Image: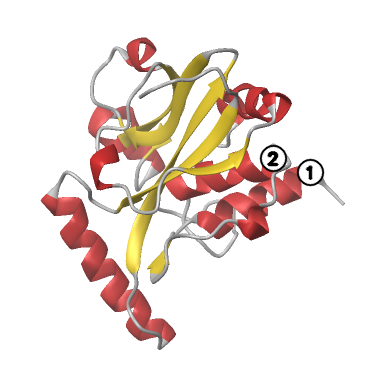
Amino acid sequence: METGPTDAVDLWWLPLGAGGHSVRLNGRVFEAVASRVARRPACDLYHSALVVRSGGAGHVIEMTPVVDGDGAARGVVAGGPVGVRAAGRLRIFRYEVRCWRDGVIPDAGEAVDSPRTLTRDAGVARRVLDLAPSVPTPVWGRDELRTGEMWNSNSLTAWLITRAGLDIDAVHPPDGGRAPGWGAGVAVAREAAGP
């Protein structure tokens, strides 16, 4: 990831399952069923990540599976269980939230319509970094927070954008795409902000 002198918050859209076949296949099956139930055309599914440049340093903020016990090396600031809370005792059933200084988005080469610069305001960029460790960490893939949508990587991104005070209503996935979980992040952030 390149960093420049300009502070900014950039949004990246990655096709769900970029770099892997299992997640991509499962995502297509999920979307086929979801679109049929909703009586709408199937969409391309996207996973989101942020790259925040602040004070001359770049940080990748992303939710990913836990790969090993050395989260500090990847800037892990939070984490939670996947699927079922009780299973979260096992690393394979945990996710991590990274705020990784000088980090990388492994599948950036597959990104679509990215990066999208959301702001160049230094204060907002700093606020996004400061908020990352306080993101809610409910069970991934479930609707524990009762928003009507599951919590996932898109929830994290939407939560950060909303809490930082950016115009979340102006942010959309690439044409023909959908970002499941996005609405959960927006709803939880707006609830926390109050009336």
Q: Residue at x 27, y 29 (%)?
A: 90
Which secondary structure, mark 2? helix
Horizontal and vertical percent for residue 105? 32, 32
What label sits on residue 163 in the rendered view? Answer: 2
137 is higher (above) or lower (below) than 1: below
Examine the rendering and report whether any part of residue 164 can be seen. yes
Horizontal and vertical percent for residue 27? 26, 61
Examine the rendering and report whether any part of residue 140 can be seen. no
Inter-mark Cα distance, 1 to 2: 7 Å
Give the camera-side residue of 136 and 12. Answer: 12
Tell me the kind of residue under disc 2. Arg
What label sits on residue 193 in the rendered view? Answer: 1
52 is higher (above) or lower (below) than 149: above
Q: Residue at x 31, y 47 (%)?
A: 111
Q: Say whether residue 120 is left or right of residue 30.
A: right
Which secondary structure, mark 1? helix
35 is higher (above) or lower (below) than 186: below
